[in-house]
Image (cartoon, rainbow, N blue to C red):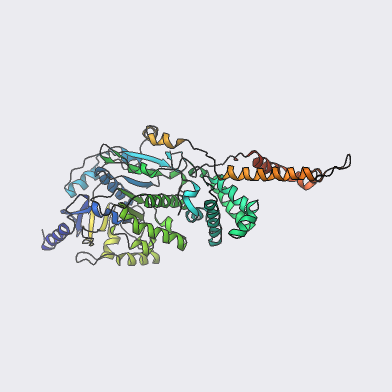
Amino acid sequence: MSDQSAKFIEKIQTSYKPTGSSIYLGAGILDGQVLANAEVNLSLKMMNRHGLVAGATGTGKTRTLQLLAEQLSDAGVPVFMLDVKGDLSGLNQPGSINPKIEERAAQLNKPFSPSGFPVEIYSLSGKLGAQMRATVLEFGPTLLAKILDLNDTQTGVLAVIFKYADDNKLPVIDLNDLKKLVSYLSDGMGADEIKESYGKISAATSGTILRKIVTIEQQGLGAMFGETSFDIEDLFGKTDGKGVISLLNISDVQNQPVLYSTYLLSLLAEIFYNMPEVGDLDKPKLVFFFDEAHLLFKNSSKTFLEQIETIIRLIRSKGIGVFFCTQAPTDVPESVLSQLGNRVQHALRAFTPNDVDALRKTVNTYPKSEFYEIDKTLTSLGTGQALITVLNEKGIPTEVSATMLTPPRAIMGPLSIADYNSLIQASSLNEKYQKSIDPESAYEILTKRVNDKLTEEQDEAVQEEVPSKKGEKSIVEQVMGATITRQIGKEIVRGIFGMLTGKKPRSTGGKGFFGF
């Protein structure tokens, strides 16, 4: 062994040897050689200081998330993960040994012990797991505006609508409630009322909001808004001492990145607002993995980004760790990136000017190293290798180490269809969230208010009515007989009867969660 190798091992051992419980990430690499004694560990105590797992497509980011989740589960720490492609369900069953795994285990001098872990599977559509829902009011105007892709003016109007609902104790549970409320306040009985107290809502703005809501319903995603909304306590489960790994399978809604990334933030926000302060713990109460994180920040408003920054900065005092997973650190705003103390950087490519710029900025986020040229190392890492620096127990960044990562012990892929369905059917949480509840809410309350007003006006009209000549048509009969009325009659009748009966129209979606 060379003097340089001995010096490297000594520095890595000193830097990555926590006194308490830790996660074994792998072993350091120097000059292309894996040095098994240069063990790279991440202190469980520091996992609420958050982290970043980054790298180009195909470099092994998902498997890094898997090995982190497995060891957290072993330590009794529950995990929540976004399953983008639906291929993390294999965490439930032990993996199998193959030549590549045997080779890596030999390099690390660690025996490979296949193992399965307790898994719960959720779905935003309700088709791939237990239905995750949130009420519209729980979502709040800022996050809902993000999902509906509203501009600043429309977002402000939505905030006013939420304020009106709050002031008037109108429960806005599902999208039908919200549509009813928008219509009521823009061109219904409530238009004058809201104009006087909050400001007028234009027909153009309300029309845009309504169209955006209908689009969500037509995509079959209305089911995520309503009751029973998801109980965050279900994320903190343990089975036989192991932390439960909760997977949100979004493989059927991959084309709706804004929706599922915003939902994840709403879930994180509810955890933040409802969990008690716990200070520094020996290990986190929950670790939240935010895959495809760049989708959360893309085209986000200043208000939205400020809320993310606030949550990330303060949620660690609740014992919650958050790890973002994306292609490059530049995908994450600097205000958030500065709070991510633990870094696992897989290979970056430098094929385009933008790639070169991202590489340069990434290099600047790492401490200087006497063992590596960071830019060259980042572009030469192989699959399953990463450049790592984390926080030690004193909060100081560790020595930078190119690392051969330990392989996951569960199946690195999806369960079979039969096993997947069996796992879902056996879950008590699937049964808990299977059926939606339709309580009395804004739709019913406003419908009754409109009906009462119509009845009152009709009674007054009857009292004031002067008998017409025999055979002469009333004004109502004349209007209803007009050609243009017959052309749009179906739409009018549908609206009038929906209003008079007090029944909610059938939604193409359904129900849902959290607001600020």
In-front residue for pair 276/257: 276
480 displayed left or right of 494 = right
Residue at the extreme front of the image, as rendered: 463
In-front residue for pair 271/407: 271
From the image, which quarter does the C terminus lie in?
Answer: bottom left
Q: Is residue 503 above or below residue 305?
A: above
User: How many badges with numbers are in the image?
Assistant: 0
Residue at the extreme right of the image, as rendered: 470
The answer to whether residue 223 of the structure is visible from this angle is yes
Q: Residue at x 22, y 64 (%)?
A: 372
Counting from the top left corner in percent of width and height, residue 455 is at 70, 42
Quarter of the image where one finds residue 353: bottom left
Counting from the top left corner in percent of width and height, residue 59 is at 32, 53
From the image, which quarter does the N terminus lie in?
Answer: bottom left
365 displayed left or right of 508 = left
Counting from the top left corner in percent of width and height, residue 404 is at 23, 53
The answer to whether residue 345 of the structure is visible from this angle is no
In-front residue for pair 352/304: 304
Counting from the top left corner in percent of width and height, residue 105 is at 20, 46
